[in-house]
Amino acid sequence: MWFPFWRSRDRFSLEELRYLTDQLQKVQIVNQVNKDFVIEALRSIAELLTYGDQHDSAFFEFFMEKQVMGEFVRILKVSRTVTVSLQLLQTMSIMIQNLKNEHAIYYMFSNEHINYLITYSFDFRNEELLSYYISFLRATSGKLNKNTISLLVKTQNEEVVSFPLYTEAIRFAFHEENMVRTAVRALTLNVYHVGDESVNRYITSAPHADYFSNLISFFGKQCNGLNKLVSQSLKNPSPDSTSIILAAVDEIEDNLYYFSDIISAGIPDVGKLITDHMLQLLILPLLLPSLRINAVDENGIGAVTCLYLLCCILRIVKIKDLSNMIAAALFCSPEAYIQNFETKQNGYMPGHDFVGERQQQDNNCQTEVDTEDAIKKNNFSCSDLTLREALLSYITSGDDVHVLGSLSVLATLLQTKELDESMLDALGILPQRKQHKKLLLEALVGEVSGEEQLFSSESNMLRDGIDSELDGYLLKMKEQYGVLHSSLNLGTSPRVNRQQVLDALVSLFCRSNISAETLWDGGWLLRQLLPYSEAEFNSHHLKLLKDSYKNCTSGLLKEIRGAWSDLIMTVICNEWKKCKRVIEASSPQKEPKCILMPSQKSSFEDNIPGESSFSAGERLCELVKVFVLLLQLQIFSLGRALPDQPPIYPPFDVPENSRARNAGVDISGPKPGTELKIVDAVPCRIAFEKGRERHFFFLAISMGTSGWVVLAEETPLKQQFGIVRVAAPLAGSNPRIDEKHTRWLHMRIRPSILPFMDPATSVKVKTKALLDGRWTLAFRDEESCKSACSMILDELNRQSNELERRLRPLIDLERALDSLDIFPVSSEASSSSIKASNSW
């Protein structure tokens, strides 16, 4: 019966389309016998219409004349096989996606055929069928505009009463398959961005508006899931923890970017719905209470996860009211939210099932706040602390993760463009330049108060403006969400709040148990608040910073005679440039997700016998980072501009009577295979392989801040000359004469590289490559052994003395500041100074 279908015809011809249509119209039922023909016919018709759309309008005219869309619907009705349904959906998707002619699209969407296919009862237990169906819906949404959307909705009294494409799609908005969820989100965005007011009213009316509360509920469950992963990682870290957390973070941020894309459609009621649900279902009952000090709630979200989520919400979801409500909420005690939302009935908020039941906070909780901090002076208890003060408390007394999280929240608030400047001023984090800009504008337009404050040492923003903004948002929280703020002292001057922030940051720089990277983030925030003036540093601040700088200097002095003394100059120069770049950057160096995966920091432990070069080098880099930051803060606190290079003395010429000169070593140092004089060398024996002892001449030499221990073989034809076979760093050699064998000299030979100077370098990867060697040199007599040991100590002393001389401006604060004038920085001078320090 179907044999003629296979006859030879021009594949892309109107005759072929006519034949396929005629044969399709003859089909009364689709079964196992004819399904293959029907499937091929549907596929071929889609292909022919796509071809015709680009080459010959007669194809689609025939398609309309024969009402082939009606035939598609009829075939679906008489079909008994899922494969035909699959092909029909695919055919529709291909046609809708590829047809460019607006008249053709308009025809496709008319006559209710598309809506029939959308509402048809497919068996979605078949995953492939669901995939094709969602693709069909997404393709349809891609052709929506203000003209075509009217063909897919039903109206009554000029109001939309039915929109199957939208309502059927959002049924799958929270499907377990990510590809399905992504397609549905793309479809909804296509609908929102059409800008049809009647459709907008439809999607924001009940019950369709529940979609937005369900979105927030779904997002809340993902937040809880992320929190569990973070908690498990802290308790039982594993190699896969980071990748698992990052995958969860990607989903969290994808959701927030979806909210942002919805907002960008510019539908006012949608923005209000998202703001309301975000606050009511997530931020006020779940996130903000988690910020309280010593919070213990197994059903809640941990403070670390909470800090990250607040950063992401502020950074990604660009809603003015939402940003300002979050900022205003920080002026309330967390108990205000806990007590309020614990009294809500379970059915009060749609989708609030993801918010766990909360237990009453322990009334006896205590905080450990630095004694130098203003928060401690105010004698706050846990219940007294506002959320803003809790953030500052984390900075002054929290661990590294909480400090980083709190700094990230403050930095994010500072960079949130949707946040009113008056709110930033109330928080105490309005940058000084913005304060002066506002006061200058007020002075220019003749406002007396602005002029007085601009030229006053007690300059701050107008109280009236701040109170009105803050009071307005706090009133909204009370009226809309029942959050009380009776304990809030709104009369407090922003200058007091600003002073609290500065107190907390200065206190942070005095802490020795916080990683340098986190301290740098604190330095960035300080520079944002005070970009060019030292006026807001009081004498107490300056004393704390100076004392902290002196303590760090003591640690650096120990490193001058440590295992990596030859690279101290290089590390300081490198870290100086990095630190300056970080604290003067326009944004923080780390993304909020770093809060969830803090890098391992080294401890400032003293040098201990037997310590590995790896640990010593790690400690040195960490110490130098802190030292450089504190020195730059000293310069900055006194209103001085930071030079591009650290103020250090230039190198001295190598003395004529030095061992390096006597050996004929040039500035590049002894290289294996090069020739040198061995007039000061001591003969010795060493076995690098078991049973294979070799004879060498041993020599220790230093040039400036660099030094080497050298093993050379005497040249047979040239007396008093030798060929360098082995050269190793002098620093860290720790020479020791064997107690039982006084002709043996033991030395530690550390690697010549420092792999953790770049923060991106994986320490774990480099650990195996950074192993210490051990030399045991045998000399012909006891005197020779002592002479070799004395030579090493003498050169180490020369090397350390030169290093101390060159670093003297940095070690002595007054000299450091004076040297900024002694050594005016220029690009050429900086370049030559670095080259010399790296070489010598």
Image (cartoon, helix red, strand yellow):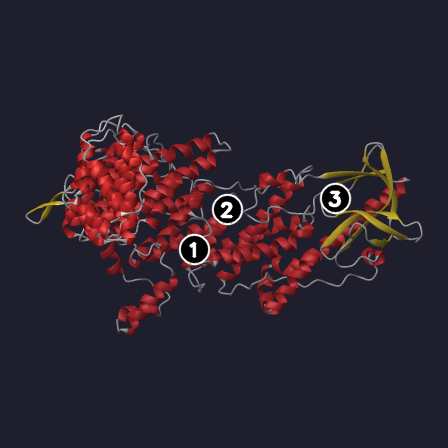
Q: CA separation, marks 2 and 3?
A: 32 Å
State the SS at label 1: loop
- Mark 1 — residue? 587
Q: How crowded is mark 3: few (under 14 residues within 10 Å), some or many (20 or more)?
A: many
Depth order, front residue of 652/209: 209
Q: Note whether residue 38 is visible.
A: yes
Q: What residue type is labelled 2?
A: Arg
Depth order, front residue of 543/360: 360
Q: Residue 784: x percent and y percent?
A: 88, 43
Dot 2 or dot 3: first in sequence order is 2
Q: Quadrant of the C terminus?
A: bottom right
Q: Residue 222: x percent and y percent?
A: 33, 36
- Mark 3 — residue? 733
Q: What residue type is labelled 1?
A: Ser
- Mark 2 — residue? 511
Q: Residue 2: x percent and y percent?
A: 26, 32
Is 834 left, or right, of 404 in this rendering?
right
